[in-house]
Image (spheres, rainbow, N blue to C red):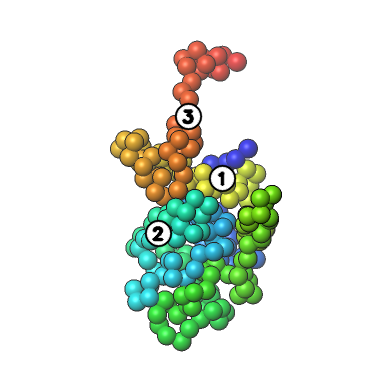
Amino acid sequence: MSKILDVKEIIKLARKHGRDPFNPRDELVIVLTGLAYFNATELSRMQVKDIINERTGIALDAYLPGSYGNNGFKRYFFVGEKTYLRECIQRYIDWRKDNGFSCIKENAYCGLNPDSCFILKNDGSEFTLNYKTKDKGSDLTQPLQMQRLFKSYFLDEGVSIVSLMDSFIANFWNEKSKQGTVQAIRDLMELTGLTAETLRRKCIRKQDSIQDILVGLYK
């Protein structure tokens, strides 16, 4: 069963993976998934220039290109100015530079090659996508290498890429819906690229009747 984590639990999990035998890349991958709704394909394909500006450095917020998703949707994500996510991004940048992974001599893009994939393997190579041909001849990409990376993490039962992404939705909904459910759904559509119908199914649970609650109490 999928396990939903609150923000503090996600941060605790991420911090645990920022130390040996893991590294700042692993901490960042968990944070991007649980606090910014990045899926395995986006983590594999995102480039440096998608998250780092040429002159101003780490972006406060940005849009991922629609080409990264199956529906062509440009998805909004937020980093912020003084956030744990921003700290993780900076530690990862330093890790890449310390290892000399796709760096440039100029100060632009925080010293990283803007056209290189942002998330890299321990040896500096990219996480490639696997292609599985459909019956009609079109190609379906599968981020198997990134998925295998997640399977190497120390995750409790029920915690996965999917559950971390669902945790992002649940945590945003619990906070934003206090101001109104309609706007909360609209904001989540921009943040996730999911349809309003899908989000309603995930966020608005069927309320138990008085009788159902009492039956549960009296068991």
Q: Position of residue 122 (x, y in %)?
A: 63, 71
The residue that appears at 52% across and 74% down in the rendered structure is 116
- Spatial CA span between label 2 and label 1: 23 Å
The residue that appears at 46% across and 23% down in the rendered structure is 207
Regarding residue 202, the answer to whether it shows in the image is yes
The circle on residue 205 is 3
Query: Do residues under tags 2 and 1 come within 8 Å of each other at their CB atoms?
Result: no
First in sequence: mark 3 vs mark 2:
2
Mark 1 is surrounded, within 10 Å at the Cα level, by few (under 14), some (14 to 19) or many (20 or more) other residues, namely some
Q: Position of residue 187 (x, y in %)?
A: 36, 45
Q: Secondary structure at mark 3?
A: loop
Q: Is residue 100 above or below residue 76?
A: below
User: In the image as oriented, which residue stretches furthest toward the bottom?
Assistant: 105
Residue named by callout 2? 63
Left or right relative to 60: residue 36 = right
Residue named by callout 1? 163
The residue that appears at 42% across and 76% down in the rendered structure is 109
Query: Do residues under tags 3 and 2 come within 8 Å of each other at their CB atoms?
Result: no
The residue that appears at 52% across and 48% down in the rendered structure is 165
Regarding residue 36, the answer to whether it shows in the image is no
Q: Amino acid at mark 2?
A: Tyr
Give the mark toward the camera: 2 or 1. 2
- Please name whichever residue, 195 or 172, is drawn nearer the observer in this view of the structure: 195
Mark 3 is surrounded, within 10 Å at the Cα level, by few (under 14), some (14 to 19) or many (20 or more) other residues, namely few
Q: Secondary structure at mark 1?
A: helix
Query: Do residues under tags 1 and 3 come within 8 Å of each other at their CB atoms?
Result: no
